[in-house]
Amino acid sequence: MYTYLLLDLAIIGFPLALSFDKKVAFHKKWKYIWQGILLNLLIFLPWDVAFTDLGVWGFNSDYLIGAELFQLPLEEYLFFLVVPYAAIFIYACLEAYFPKDILYRYRKGIAWAVILVCLLLYVYFDDHLYTAVATLYLSFTMLMVLISGKHHFLGRFFMTYLIICIPFLICNGILTGLPVVWYNDMENLGIRIFSIPADDLIYNMGMLLIPLGFYARNTRK
């Protein structure tokens, strides 16, 4: 009955417990994470409410605690807090334990490749609402990062994204497999990775870009 809440707690549990690790000392940087997370909430919560109302996706009450606000379960609000927190924590760990940013020299090339792929997907699937909005959002946000010139963090961002894809596939596999969250395949690519819509990979990258970007900017020495 409390599956979604337990998943939220599992996502935050490990990084929260290790936030006091002496080498990373992530707890000392908490004040730098909220600006990006709050901006994310202002973007993604209205998006989530609209897509729920339009039937692009929805939630199975059998796996929820029952508390809702604007058609979204409480667990969904927590999701937009715990996932960025976990991602920023991984980013901080990479900085502390692997100071050499191995993707730094390739960051702009990867970013342009992401933009190109997103735009191509939009052209071919613009009538699929989830695909269209997710690809446009990621391509626009990534382009703004490149234009701003503040893209020093993108190498570690892409590495963080690759790492977080592992727990993402596990947790999202549970959410979509039961399903706790269901999707209308008429509004997405119609391609599933196990039970997960492929569009979620695009959505996830877009959701992490702003929080990690703000954290990197606020902590850059």
Image: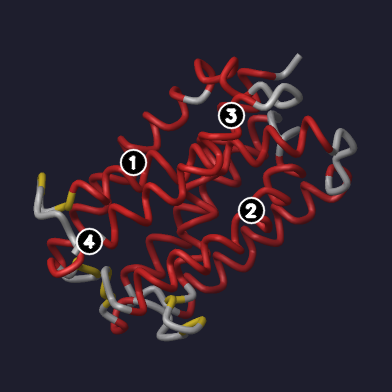
> Mark 2 against mark 1, which lies toward the viewer?
2
Residue at which label 2 appears: 161
The CA distance from mark 2 to mark 1 is: 20 Å
Disc 1 element: helix
Q: For the residue labelled by badge 2, is the local secondary structure a helix, a strand or a loop?
A: helix
**C-alpha gap between disc 2 and disc 3:** 19 Å
Q: Is residue 29 above or below residue 169?
A: above
Residue 77 position in % (x across, y down): 27, 44
Labelled pair 4, 1 in contact (Cβ < 8 Å): no
Where residue 48 sits: x, y (%)? 25, 53
Say what secondary structure mark 4 lies in.
helix
Give the residue pinned by disc 4.
51
Marks 4 and 3 sit apart, C-alpha to C-alpha, by 34 Å
Please state which amino acid type lies under the numbered disc 4.
Answer: Phe
Q: Which amino acid type is marked by label 3?
A: Ser
Q: Give the answer, above or below, for where 151 lies relative to 135.
A: above
Of labels 4 and 3, the one closer to you: 3
Q: Provide the residue designation for mark 1.
A: 43
How is this picture coloured?
Answer: secondary structure
- Left or right: residue 3 versus residue 200 is left
Could you say which disc has been placed on residue 19 in the image? 3
Where does the N terminus fall, quadrant-wise? bottom left
Of residue 80 and residue 66, the one placed in the foreground of this image is: 66
Callout 3: few (<14), some (14-19), or many (20+) C-alpha neighbours within 10 Å?
A: many
Q: Please indicate whether residue 115 sits to the left or right of residue 81 in the image.
A: right
Tell me the quadrant of the picture where the C terminus can be found.
Answer: top right
Amino acid type, residue under disc 1 in the picture: Ile
Check disc 2 and give the amino acid type.
Tyr
